[in-house]
């Protein structure tokens, strides 16, 4: 975020490259990450904002089928870290407390 905060004429202003953001958004959506999920699903945790439209119910089901743990945080949208920060931190702490994937399988 701060890389887009620049000094202009003695004051700070936001500098956003909207054309680049649009290209990045389209390229990110075009990337097929399901092969990675298939290879590493049992070591993944997906945290989803319950009000987000980015990860669909079908996506969440497919993640679960690949062995990923899917946690839905009610009341959060796409920006879970903004909408439900405490709930997100609690989920991350619980996940990290499990240790590395190899230790979880032991």
Image (spheres, rainbow, N blue to C red):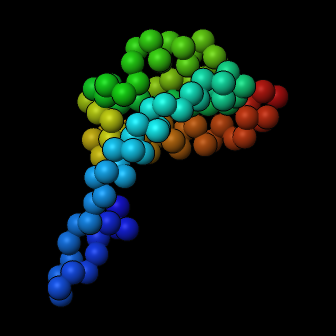
Question: Where 14 falls versus 37 (above or below)?
Answer: below
Q: How far across and down, in percent of the image, does residue 5 sit?
A: 29, 70
Q: Please, is residue 5 above or below residue 19 in the view?
A: below
Residue for point 47% across, 18% down: 60
Give above or below for 56 relative to 18.
above
Q: Give whichever of 22, 44 is nearer the camera.
A: 22
| Viewer-proximal residue among 23 and 74 | 23
Q: Nearer the viewer, residue 6 or 38?
A: 6
What residue appears at the point 26 percent right and 66 percent down from the top-left corner? Answer: 15
- Residue 48: x, y in percent? 41, 29
Report x, y in % for residue 53: 31, 25
Q: Residue furthest right?
A: 106
Where residue 75 appears, as percent x and y from the top left, is 26, 30
Question: As drawn, is 84 to the left or to the right of 41?
Answer: left
Is residue 74 visible in the rendered structure shown here? no
Taking the spot 44% from the left edge, 12% from the top edge, the residue there is: 58
Q: Which residue is found at the position 60% from the left and 12% from the top?
A: 65
How many numbered marks does the figure carry?
0
Residue 71 lies, with reference to residue 86, above or below; the image says above
Residue most extreme to the bottom: 10
């Amino acid at each position: 975020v701060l890389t887009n905060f620049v000094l202009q004429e003695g004051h700070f202003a936001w500098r956003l490259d909207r054309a680049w953001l649009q290209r990045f958004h389209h390229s990110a959506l075009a990337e097929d990450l399901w092969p990675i999920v298939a290879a590493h699903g049992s070591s993944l945790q997906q945290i989803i904002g319950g009000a987000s439209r980015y990860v669909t119910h079908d996506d969440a089901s497919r993640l679960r089928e690949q062995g990923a743990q899917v946690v839905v945080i009610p009341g959060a949208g796409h920006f879970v870290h903004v909408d439900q920060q405490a709930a997100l931190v609690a989920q991350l702490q619980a996940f990290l407390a499990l240790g590395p994937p190899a230790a979880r399988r032991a």
